[in-house]
Image: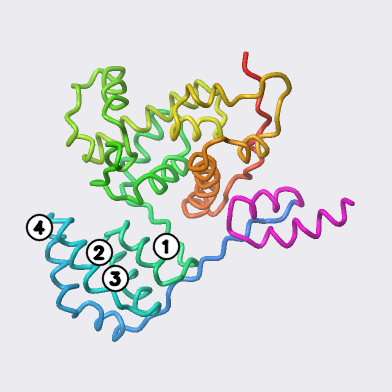
Amino acid sequence: MQSDANVIYQSIAVERSYYGFLAADKIALSYSIDDVPIQYSANEIDKIAQIPAVIRARELLLVNQPIDARREWNYATQNFTERQYQIAAYLAHQWQWHDYAIRTIAKGNYFDDLTVRFPTPFDSLVNKYSAQRKLDSAFVYAIIRRESAFNEQARSPVGARGLMQLMPATAKQMAKILKLKSPRRQDLNTPSFNINLGSRYISDMLNIFKGHRALASAAYNAGPHRVKRWLPEDNELPADVWVDTIPFTETREYVRAILAYTALFEWKINQNPSRLSTHLYPILPAR
């Protein structure tokens, strides 16, 4: 039976994913994190860069008009081939237009360029506030990547804003704790302010749930009150089982993504990702 399980684990462990990393943990394999950058020629880049709508998108970005820039980019790329999307994604990455680089490379059906897909902008801010709160910077990066894909102007349909997608009420609460002025909504689009408050909030979630990343991630997405209701009633539960039984599909997928992204950002930062299993200790019953 165990040998059969090991065969299954080996087949899954080749994947660069939450389940791939968990399977690798089961049989003590290294994580499969292959970074295969897009190969391109100067001519290919130049052809994309000289498209009139792409030129307009670039100019609009430079004068801080991201909405119009997105319109021009979408118009320019609407009939692209997969290869053209890939080259365009690399161009957007060069511009540090990370959310659109990530979106565009996905349209190009190319997922192995980890430089484009998992960039590390705002590093001085992420490192500063991670150090202040004793957080793993890769964990903070994972949240930013999932929440906004590094778009500092991001806004959700329910009103969450900025890199770490803070709700105004949460931001106001964190600002009060930090003895900062009560933020205006547009303040949440300022990277330093957003990361300061967002890192404090995830730190609070980790404190509430005794450092458990799966629980803290779920709480960041769905609220700590819901996560407390989802704790087992009687017996402890393996964390991977708990994650797969989170009632909200969005939160379930969110937690898996955060844990996998953290490993990928650890690999990006120091080439040495920690094992997911070290952060997935059993979920204790509610007290």
Query: Does the CB distance between marks 3 and 2 fall below 8 Å?
Result: yes
Q: Magenta includes 189?
A: no
Please name the residue shown 66% across and 41% down the image: 277
Q: Earlier in the sequence, mark 1 or mark 4?
A: 4
Query: Does the CB distance between marks 1 and 3 fall below 8 Å?
Result: no
Q: Earlier in the sequence, mark 4 or mark 3?
A: 4
The residue at which mark 4 appears reads as 63
The residue at which mark 1 appears reads as 115
Which residues, given as a range, are shown in magenta?
A: 1-27
The residue at which mark 2 appears reads as 95
Query: Does the CB distance between marks 4 and 3 fall below 8 Å?
Result: no
Please name the residue shown 13% across and 70% down the image: 56
Q: Nearer the viewer, residue 71 or 25?
A: 71
Look at the numbered disc 3 and give the secondary structure of its residue: helix
Label 4 – label 3 distance at C-alpha: 18 Å
Please name the residue shown 31% across and 30% down the image: 197
Q: Magenta includes 19?
A: yes
Residue kind at label 3, given as amino acid type? Leu
Query: Does the CB distance between marks 2 and 1 fall below 8 Å?
Result: no
Label 2 – label 4 distance at C-alpha: 13 Å
